[in-house]
Image (spheres, grey):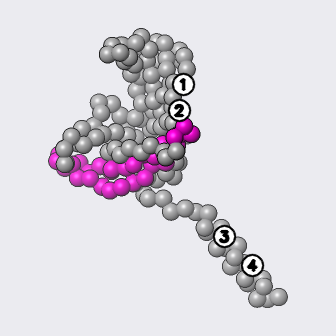
Amino acid sequence: MKYLTLILTLAITACSNSDSVSVNEKIAALNGTWVGVCIVVYRDGGPSGEYAINTYNFSNGNYTSNFTLYSDKDCVSESSIAKEEIGIVTFIEEVLTESGLTANKVQFERFDTDSIKPPTSETILYIDNNNLYFGAFLDDLNVIFFDYPYIKNISN
């Protein structure tokens, strides 16, 4: 009986430790809600009269992205959520850019019920305090970052 108790205790301990998934520290740094700025929506080469805010919610490698449409330039009057995306984000490698900035190359894998294999894309991310910048390679080490950051929502 003494050995059975020991075996059960070890089994319970092993099971409780297996629930804690090891997440790369670069991906864990994304955890939280990141809100983009209010931008003009363009359709057919010109402004559509609509505005949008994109929001990312990250949690240990999982993400949800919501692209919400607004009817006003201050993004107050919500008209609809135009696109919701869910998936996983995976760290690939650190990238030292030509300017000396160290950014992270990541892969986004979007779960799409309409496709057999989820689409994937790679991008560059850089976090500066509570600002998240998305970027892309222009060539080997030359990275361009988009004009505006996503601001971390610290009220979560």
Kindly identify which residue carries mark 1.
81
Vertical position of residue 19 compared to residue 61: above or below: below
Mark 3 vs mark 1: which is more N-terminal?
3
Dot 4 alpha-carbon crowd within 10 angstroms: few under 14, some 14 to 19, many 20 or more: few
> What residue lies at 35% left-to-right and 34% top-to-bottom?
149
Q: Over which residues does the magenta segment extend?
A: 86-115
Vertical position of residue 96 compared to residue 33: above or below: below
Amino acid found under the numbered disc labelled 1: Ile
Dot 2 alpha-carbon crowd within 10 angstroms: few under 14, some 14 to 19, many 20 or more: few
Are dots 1 and 4 in contact, CB under 8 Å? no
Kindly identify which residue carries mark 3.
15
Mark 1 vs mark 4: which is more N-terminal?
4
- Residue 8, numbered circle: 4
How far from the left and from the top, in percent, is residue 78? 54, 18
Residue 50's image quarter? top left
Kindly report the distance in space between the C-alpha atoms of the residues bearing marks 2 and 4: 44 Å
Q: Is residue 113 left or right of residue 101?
A: right
- Residue 48, numbered circle: none
Kindly report the distance in space between the C-alpha atoms of the residues bearing marks 3 and 2: 34 Å
- Magenta segment includes 87: yes
Amino acid found under the numbered disc labelled 4: Leu
Q: Is residue 6 left or right of residue 94?
A: right
As helix, strand or loop, the secondary structure at mark 2 comes to strand
Q: Residue furthest left?
A: 98
Q: Comparing marks 3 and 1, which lies closer to the viewer?
A: 1
Kindly identify which residue carries mark 2.
84
Kindly report the distance in space between the C-alpha atoms of the residues bearing marks 4 and 3: 10 Å
Dot 3 alpha-carbon crowd within 10 angstroms: few under 14, some 14 to 19, many 20 or more: few
> What residue lies at 48% left-to-right and 28% top-to-bottom?
67
Mark 2 vs mark 4: which is more N-terminal?
4
